[in-house]
Image (tube, grey):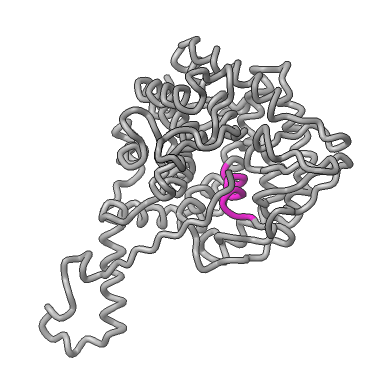
Amino acid sequence: MNRTDVRQHTDIDAGDVLGLRIDRFPGKAKMRAPIAVKWYFTVLTALLLSACESPAAENSAGEWPEWERFVARFVQADGRVIDVTFDQKTTSEGQSYALFFALVANQQERFDTLLKWTSDNLAEGQLGQMLPGWLWGKRDDGGWGIKDTNAAADADLWIAYTLLEASRLWRDPRYEVIGRHLLKQIAARDVVRAGATGVVLLPGPYGFNLSQNRYRINPSYTPGFMFAYLRNVDSSGPWGALWDNYLRLAPKMFAGGVAPDIVIVDSKGAVLPDTEKAPVGSYDAIRVYLWAGMSEGNSDELIRLLAPFAKTIRALGKPPEKVSPADGAVVKADYSPIAFTGAVLPFLSVLHEKESLDEQRSRLRVNAAEAKLGKATNYYDETLALFGQGWADGYYRFDAKGRLQPKWQP
């Protein structure tokens, strides 16, 4: 359930993309190579940017083109979301995010198709009565099916939240029934009381309860807007206590001014570094900034604690792939996934980092243009870009109670 480092290098030759080559120009011998290269890439950048529709033009059409491109590449007709980068696998996370996007796009038929595949293939047709297994794909025997029945708490929460909001927005009570059953399952299997530390959310039912009363926690599994919402719609559940405790632990979790992928908490109130691998803030942690930025009003303290990361982005011109949770130092700056750029848009927006925000939006436009020209894209990059850019372009918002406010809502 942890992110795997993803790199996709595509060599783009400016001459090939433009359909031109230097040796086709008269007087080429008089053009110095550095000037020629600079000229080519200046023209290439202009071409790429002009190939992208402006957000205003896309919004005026009342559609969500980025979501449709995501569906065309990653979603089968039967509702299965495929991670084409890693063995054609499917995760409950991918299904949960696609359900949310379909609701934002007001596509109930597609939503139902996604929901049916999720229930049939990840929960034996009993979604709500059981938690979905987190991993589906090609098994060792050559067949396709569940590879790991352990659940992923973040995906389970996203599915439950989206079902409840689908019921409200589409006025369809069927979704609420499943959503409330899921919440009961999550509360019973993924939530523990860790002594003096209080109530915490485990990443899944198995494998995160460690020896000596210690627990492995993923900070990105707790979006502020979602827990504000669950506190209201399921007041008898543990959601309010979980969020309050998360905020209480936040100064310790984010002491370095950045978010870690994983922390360990014990029953005495301590927050400790990851013990299974070198502590890092990377592919999981990037979602902490995303959720905090989208949860304005519910995550103000998190924004304050994490504000140093915005300075790092400003200095580098893009979010680094890896940082040290201890002090926020950049561990790996040579590569910045486009997922990270999409994820930090709301975060930079609420911090009023206009220059950095404009830089990241420009980077997304170039990435979209390159994708149209054939550059390979991967599931996680495009998913987080959808979240961040969809929010930034006004396709959805969350109100103070965590309710979804899609653009199409009357």
Using the rendered image of the protein, determine whether residue 403 is visible from the camera's viewpoint: no
Q: Is residue 277 left or right of residue 336?
A: right
Q: Is residue 34 left or right of residue 140?
A: left
Q: Is residue 312 left or right of residue 265?
A: left
* Residue 209, x across and y down, in percent: 75, 38
* Residue 30, x across and y down, in percent: 19, 89
Q: Farthest residue to the front: give it.
A: 141
Question: Going 76% across and 47% down the picture, which residue do you hit?
Answer: 264
Question: Going 60% across and 34% down the picture, which residue do you hit?
Answer: 150
Q: Is residue 52 left or right of residue 145?
A: left
* Residue 310, x across and y down, in percent: 61, 56
Question: Going 51% across and 68% down the picture, which residue do you hit?
Answer: 334
Question: Measured along the vertical axis of the image, is residue 156 above or below residue 247?
Answer: above
Q: Is residue 285 magenta?
A: yes
Quadrant for the N terminus in the image: top right
Question: Measured along the vertical axis of the image, is residue 140 above or below residue 373?
Answer: above
Quadrant for the C terminus in the image: top left
Using the rendered image of the protein, determine whether residue 247 is visible from the camera's viewpoint: yes
Within the image, what quadrant is residue 23 found in? bottom left
Considering depth in this image, is 58 or 23 the residue closer to the camera? 23
Give the tally of numbered discs: 0
What's the magenta region? 281-290
* Residue 337, x across and y down, in percent: 48, 57
Within the image, what quadrant is residue 145 found in? top left
Within the image, what quadrant is residue 143 found in? top left
Considering depth in this image, is 265 or 316 the residue closer to the camera? 265
Question: Going 49% across and 22% down the picture, which residue do you hit?
Answer: 124
Question: Measured along the vertical axis of the image, is residue 345 above or below residue 278?
Answer: above
Q: Farthest residue to the bottom: give it.
A: 30
Q: Is residue 380 magenta?
A: no
